[in-house]
Image: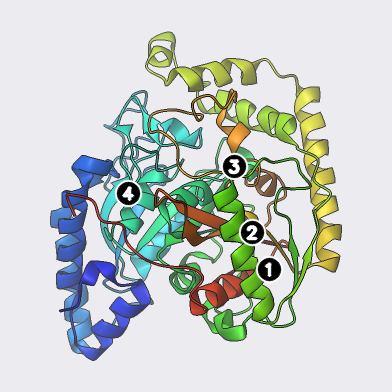
Amino acid sequence: MTELTELTAVRLLDGYRKGEWGPVEATRAALERAEAVQPEVNAFVRLTAEEALEQARESEERWRRGEPRGLLDGVPVTVKDILLQCGAPTLRGSKAVDPAGRWDEDAPSVARLREHGAVFIGKTTTPEFGWKGVTDSPLSGITRNPCDPSRTAGGSSGGSAAAVALGAGPLSLGTDGGGSVRIPASFCGIFALKPTYGRVPLYPASAFGTLAHVGPMTRDAADAALLMDVIGHPDSRDWSALSAPAGPYTDGLAGGVRGLRVAYSPSLGGQVAVQPAVARAVRRAVERLAELGAYVTETDPDLTDPVEAFHTLWFSGAARVTQHLGPHQRELLDPGLREICARGARYSALEYLAAVDVRMDLGRRMGRFHDTYDLLVTPTMPLTAFEAGAEVPKGSGHRRWTGWTPFTYPFNMTQQPAASVPVGADADGLPIGLQLVAARHRDDLVLRAAHALYGAGVASAGRPTLSGS
C-alpha cells in the first residue's frame, strides 16, 4: 500500500490525475503525521485540520469533475509563521505580537498557493522574527531535529524543514535572510532553494531589507521547481519583485549538467574548518557531477569573510523590527535578540552605508566569478546538527550563529540563488548538505544541477523515523 506521506508533490498530483488517491486521503495522512510527530519535534505553532479537510474536499470535487485549479490543487502545504496567511495569526515566534490582529491578508507567495488550490495544514515554527540560525523562541519553545530530537533542526525555517522531512506535507514556504532555508535543509536532509532576490515577492517588506528571500522547502528539486512555477511571479505589493520568468522551471529540469562549468570550493580557500564527514560527502557528490559531464575545477571565489558587514545590516534590521516595542514588550523578547537589537540601534548611517559598500563589492566580485563558472559548489554547512536549544555549538567559541554558517549568509548579501541538496549523512546518521550557487537570475541552473544529483542517486528524499511517526 502506498504511504502517501512518503510521496513528493509531483507524485501526489500524478495519483490524483490517475484516480489512485485523492486530496482528502492525502491531507488526512499529512495531518495525522503532523499530529504524531509534533510532541517530539515541535514543528508547528498551529495545525488547521478542519479548514484543511474542507479545502481538500473542495479540491477532490474539482478533480472529480476533471477541473483542477492550478498546479497544486489538493497538495498539503505548510507555511512558516513569518508569512501572512489570511485567517491565521502570524505571531512570528514572538510574545510581543498581539494575536488579536486583523489577519485578513495573504503574503504574495501564500496567495499564489491559494490560487493554485493548495491545502494549508498548518503554520510552522520560527525563532523570534526569524533572527537566528536555529529554531527556538520564548513563544513556541525548541524545534528539534527529525533524525535525532536531541539535536537542533537548524533555522530559522526549522519547523518547515522538520515538517517536510517527516512527511507532514511535501511542500513548505520558508524565508531566508542569512541561510534560513538552507541551514535547516542541510541539518534535516531535505531540499531548499533561496531564489534570486525578488523572484518570489515578499509583503510586508522585511525589516531585514533586501537580505530576506522567500523560498521552497521540499522533498526534492522537482517539487521545488513546481513550487517556484507557482510562487515565482510578480506581485504589485512588492516594489522590488522581478518580472515573470521566461518559462516554467519544471521545463528545464531535464537539461542535466553536461558542459556546465562548476567551481568546487571545499572550504572557501581554507577560511572554513569543515568536519571530515561533511567534506567527504560533498566531494563525492562533486565527483559525480564530473562523471555526469560537468567541467569541475577546484577553486575559490574571491570571498573575504563579510561577517562584520552582514552583522551591521542584520542587527540594524533586528533593531528596526523591534523599534515600536515598549519596555514591557522588550522584556518578553529572546535575550539574544534583545542583545543584537541594542547593538543594531547604535550603528550610524555612515556605518550602515559602509556595510552596503562591502555588499556591493562582494556582488561585483561574484558577478565576475560567474563570468567564468556557471555554478559554485560548497558544503551548505561545515558541520552536522548540534545540540538543540543552543545558538552555537558547545565549545565552538562562536558568539553568534553567523560563526558556524560561513557558507550561507554571503549569498544573501549578493542576492544569488543558492540551494541545499542532501548528499549523505555522518556516522551518527545526521544529514549533510551540498550548496549550489549560481549567478543572479539563474535559478534554473541551480534546480537543474540539483535535479541531476537526485537522478544520479546522490541526493536522497528519504524520511527519518521518530518514535511518534
| Residue type, numbered disc 1 | Arg
From the image, tell me which residue sits under label 3. Answer: 178
Near mark 2 (Cα within 10 A), the count class, few <14, some 14-19 or many ≥20, is many
**Dot in front, 3 or 4:** 4
| Residue type, numbered disc 4 | Pro
N-terminal label among 4 and 1: 4
From the image, tell me which residue sits under label 1. Answer: 442
- Of the numbered discs in the image, which one, if any, rests on residue 146? 4
- The kind of secondary structure element at disc 3 is loop
Q: Is there CB contact under 8 Å for labels 1 and 2?
A: yes
Near mark 3 (Cα within 10 A), the count class, few <14, some 14-19 or many ≥20, is many
Mark 3 to mark 4 CA distance (whole Å): 22 Å
From the image, tell me which residue sits under label 2. Answer: 196
| Residue type, numbered disc 2 | Thr
Q: Residue at x 69, y 44 (%)?
A: 410
Q: Residue 303: where, in percent of width, then height?
A: 80, 45
Q: Is residue 275 left or right of residue 67?
A: right
Q: Is residue 208 left or right of residue 155?
A: right
Q: Is there CB contact under 8 Å for labels 3 and 4?
A: no
Q: Residue at x 66, y 79 (%)?
A: 291
Mark 1 to mark 2 CA distance (whole Å): 8 Å
Q: Nearer the viewer, residue 158 or 85?
A: 158
Near mark 1 (Cα within 10 A), the count class, few <14, some 14-19 or many ≥20, is some
Mark 1 to mark 3 CA distance (whole Å): 19 Å
Q: Is residue 455 left or right of residue 80?
A: right
Q: Residue at x 40, y 65 (%)?
A: 219
